[in-house]
Image: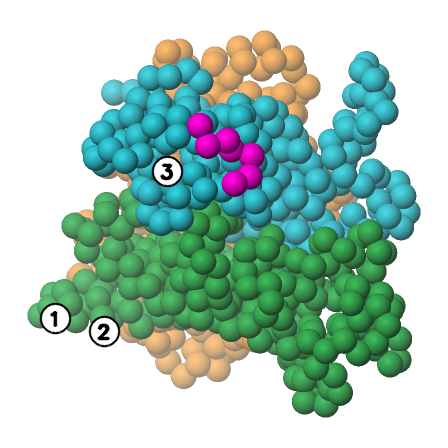
Amino acid sequence: MNFLLKRAITYLVVFFVVLNLTFILPRLVPGNAAELLASGTRVPASAAVAIAARFGLGQPIYVQYVSFLKNIFFTWPPWLGVSYGYFPATVTSLFMGRIGWSLGLILSSFLFGFLLIYFLGAKSLLKRKSKVETGSLYASIMFNSVPLFWVSMVLLFAFAIHFKIFPLFGSTGFSSSGGLSYVSSVIWHAVLPITVLSLSIMAEGFLILRGSAQDILRSNYILAAKTRGLSDWTISTGYLLRNSLLPLVSILSFSMASLISRVVLVEVVFGYPGVGDLLVDAVLGRDYPVIEGSFFYLTILVVIGGLIGDVALMRLDPRLRINR
Amino acid sequence: METNSLLRISDLVVDYHIGKSFVRALDNVSLDFSASGESVGLVGESGSGKTTFAMSILNLIEPPGRIVSGKVEYKGQNVLTMSKSHLMKYRWGEVSMIYQSAMDSLNPVKQVSQPIIEVIRKHKKASKKEAKERALQGLQDVGIPLNRANAYPHELSGGMRQRVVIALALALSPRLLIADEPTSALDVVTQRQILDLIKRQIAERGLSLIFITHEMSLLNGLVEQIAVMYRGEIVEKGRAWEVLTNPKHPYTEILIASLLTSNSKLRPFETRVNPPGESAAVSGSNYCKFVNRCKYAFDRCRKERPLLKETSGGNLVACHKYT
Amino acid sequence: MSAKIGILIIACVLGFLFSAVLFGHHSPQAIVGPADAPPSLKYPFGTDYLGHDLLSQVAFGAFPTLFIGLVAALGGTSIGFLAGLYGGYYQRLQPVISGAIDVVLSFPSIVLLILIASLFLASNNLIAISLVLILWATVARGVRAQVASLKNLPYVDAARTSGMSEWRVVNRVIAPAVAPIAVSYFVLTVSIGIVIATSVEWIGLGNVTEVSWGSILYYAQTYAFIRGDWWWVVEPGLMLALVAIGFALIGFAIEEELNPRLRTYGDKFTSENI
């Protein structure tokens, strides 16, 4: 319980910081409010005034802060502003509309990445200095350092343009019409992004796993297990991995953060209609409300991921449970 | 070739490589165990090779250690050249081990009954239910009540953990039990309890025992034979009582004297403190390794390595005093 | 071993680029040849959609990118080192700094950079400074862990009890012991820094008029696919990838050297194990 409490406090702080950043930043940038009123794009002047009023612009700061908080905590869905580019859609609706696709990528690449880490770890970590181990190690270092967006671009060029196997962009094709063809179209569009993301997760995770495994390998219970004539596989999974994976789970919240960064880049390259794509779109189009709102929601996603990771850790590591 | 010895170790040489040089952990060690429940105590300080010896019996010397030469024959079969499947059956099925530090030897994320169940299922192909029953029974035999069988290692006291380790070692009813300093990490009272437990189980099951320790006093009444190791060699071997009351090798004398009982031959202040850095064995020698600490040392000791020879009283001693 | 490969890679890449800069005939900004020309003897890296010589672009573009990376790494490592050192040693600072580290690391870094770069005027300096704000946390985390493990070692205790003030113990005893790890972190953050910086520029948030690897890729992202100019995409990214991998290998090799637990042999041997 104590452990979970400490983590929860960290997340609260993170949330608090994000919350206030989302309030402060737009008001810090001089052009922001003015831009809203003078943008001359799709926002009609009357609506602009109404929005400004809802934002509380022109009123004292603390009043603005109160209405800001009200809009987030006491309205459902939370109101974070209206998009300039997709007017009159609210930021929240835009984000929620696209989160599905991003979560699809995130969850599936997490799954595949984890499976890869697990099996590579089980096969290679017990034996020191084997070819599999060195191979996985260097592959991981390499894949961890290369720019993800570039790899995506190269793969896109290779497989979508040159070999014409995978589709060029989007998450579904135009001609799909529900049912099986829709599903297969979704899968086909997702292959490249998921591949890139999974490999990247695997690379980062494997390096960390290897680090903790080296420590664990020196402990006596691994040797003790060998004295009992247990198979390499049993020792690898039940003893080595079971213990080495724990530190990996504990950094899940940080991993979520870097994973979201990566998803953003990958979505842009593949034109995948998730929140990352939304974010970058907004950046290029100076759609400030969307930018700030996305940042807010994405960080919340990170926090949720972290909490899940910490709960999982508590369940997996009996030493963390204090049941006196 | 079937012999009537249960376990015969012949001229075992094991080296550990560090960087470019190496250390000879076992220097031509031989030991013979006959078939019926014999027990031997193995005594020596850290670095003498005791644990390496135990590990060799199970063929578990890992890099940077290397078995250079020698044989370990269990019921006539050389453990060091056995096939992998045979080896897996041999380990734990025939020879098992009680570890020194139970906390380090048990998987911290598994309940204490788990490794026992695991080993039973692996070796005997029992169902989950059967294995669990046998495991719980085994735990009860060593004094762990049913309601503690699902505890995790860190939730148990040191003594309880050691009992788990013992139950684990006995789970497959092996023929030979190796106890590697099983009581070093325990307080005196618990030590006595654990020793009694081991004695009882050995007697009840008719097991052979190798009891490794650096404390000779524990061996009294526990084992029939005592072998004394120094820097990778067995320097004295014989019946327990003989060795304890009539030590022949100078090193054994020091060990006995440090027990400070009333019938030791040496006064405590006559023993020499171990020069620093000399406990680990060094590579092959043609002199007596004990020469720097020996109060009886003479010329021959520096030039020739003493071999184990029988002396009056039945002990085998490796010392030039007796040849 | 890895270090040698890493150094080799970087040396090759940089050597290649430097010679391109010194001996190159073309200015990166000038339109010199046919548009969309694949690599050839005349234009070893080909040309882009307007006819710029890509070799010159990639060669000159290396500097802003590497510069940002190095500066950010220096800043990040310095701050991170100090934070980890004092945060790890002094009990009262511990929760504050650890908390700060955790909080910083919980933000998606690129998203944060995007946020900052889009709200304020995007420039190389801004990217560098923001990078420092992100990178210090990673360094601090590692340094703090190292300090924590060293803090209670006998020889540190000995220094304390011999009358050294805490201040001196931290600076004279612990800091030098942790410094080598900081070096490996420096190298690693260079690797991370140039990649993140390029990613931000590639989105379009950097200075797109200045030639850097990121800006080349920015234009490539928009035009290369349609025009089939694969070399335009491959080359700058490949240079970046090689340099990043090179630094990562060096950093890893240093870490491995310093941290015996990461070695594959030789640490199980102690006299107690015999």
Kind of residue indicated by mark 2 = Arg
Q: CA distance from mark 1 to mark 2?
A: 10 Å
Indicate which label's residue lies in the foreground, 3 or 1. Answer: 3
The hue used for chain A is cyan
Query: Where does the image place residue A134, in percent across and percent down from the top left?
Result: 67, 57
Mark 3 lies on residue: A22
Q: Is residue C115 visible?
A: yes
The disc labelled 3 sits on which kind of residue?
Thr
User: Residue B270: which quarter of the image?
Assistant: bottom left
| Crowd tier of the residue under label 2, counting other residues whose Cα lies within 10 Å: few below 14, some 14–19, many 20 or above | few
Residue C180 at x, y = what percent?
40, 70
- Main SS of the magenta part reads loop
Residue ID at (38%, 56%): C133
Kindly indicate which chain is depicted in green in the rendered structure.
C
Please give the chain letter of the residue carrying mark 1: C
Give the letter of the chain under mark 2. C
- Crowding at dot 3, Cα within 10 Å, few <14 / some 14-19 / many 20+, comes out as many
Q: Give the quarter of the image for residue B300.
A: bottom left
Do callouts 1 and 2 mark residues in contact (Cβ within 8 Å)? yes
Of residues B57 and B42, the one nearer the viewer is: B57
The front one of A165 and B47 is: A165
Residue C172's disc is 2
**Mark 3 belongs to which subunit?**
A
Please tell me which residue lies in front, B49 or C164.
Answer: C164
Residue pictured at 37% horizontal, 17% vertical: A75
Q: Is residue A149 left or right of residue C225?
A: left
- SS for dot 3: helix
Q: Quadrant of the N terminus of chain B?
A: top right
- Residue displayed at 12% across by 70% down: C164
Visual hue assigned to chain B: orange
